[in-house]
Amino acid sequence: MARVSPPASPIDAPTGAPSIQVFGLENDQATRAAVRFFKERRVPISFVDLRRRSIASGELRRFVERLGALACADTEGRAWREAGLGYLRMTDEELAPKLLSDVRLLRLPLIRHGRDVTAGRAESTWKAWLSGGS
């Protein structure tokens, strides 16, 4: 009997094509711009709408380890001001649970390409990923 391989996960891209995972909100302008950026270049992406499915703590930890919690936080946003976080000095370990509990505090989109990550709009980095330089 012939073995049938399981279907590829949405994160798996065809051989040779980059694998991009986008975390964001469907109605967020920066997230829509990022999705459009990759779609215009015909790059397969996996989009995770954070309103429907929250980011896993391990996934957020990956962003915080590589960028720092403050780089992942939207310090200019309304939710940041309303939470009074601008007046507090917090370590990455103290800030990460707050980011995990309220998606509005995140700088969106969060994008992962293999081991590389970005927070917010970073088109020059995304172009470097697509041209082969990580």
Image: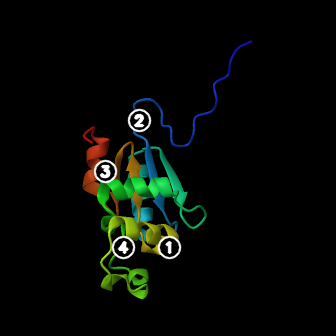
Q: Label 4 sits on what residue type?
A: Asp
> What residue appears at the point 68 percent right and 18 percent down from the top-left corner?
3
Give the foreground label among 3 and 1. Answer: 1
| Numbered tag placed on residue 74 in the rendering | 4
Q: Name the residue beneath numbered marker 3.
A: 126
Q: Do the residues under discs 4 and 3 have CB atoms within 8 angstroms?
A: no
Answer with mark 3 or mark 1, whichever residue precedes in sequence.
1
Q: Is residue 12 visible?
A: yes
Residue 117 position in % (x across, y down) = 35, 52
- Quadrant of res 79: bottom left
Would you say 1 lies left or right of 77 here?
right
Percent position (x, y) of residue 25? 50, 66
User: How many numbered marks, from 0 up?
Assistant: 4
Q: Is residue 4 left or right of residue 17?
A: right
Between 56 and 6, the residue placed more toward the observer is: 56
| Quadrant of the snapshot with the C terminus | top left
Query: Is there CB contact under 8 Å for labels 1 and 2?
Result: no
Indicate whether 122 appears above or below 126.
Answer: below
For residue 116, above or below residue 12: below
Q: Is disc 1 surrounded by few (<14), some (14 to 19) or many (20+) residues within 10 Å? A: few
Residue under label 2, please give it: 17
Q: Mark 2 is on which residue type?
A: Ala
Indicate which label's residue lies in the foreground, 2 or 4. Answer: 4
Colour setup of the view: rainbow
Ranked by sequence position, the earlier of labels 2 and 4 is: 2
Q: Secondary structure at mark 1?
A: loop
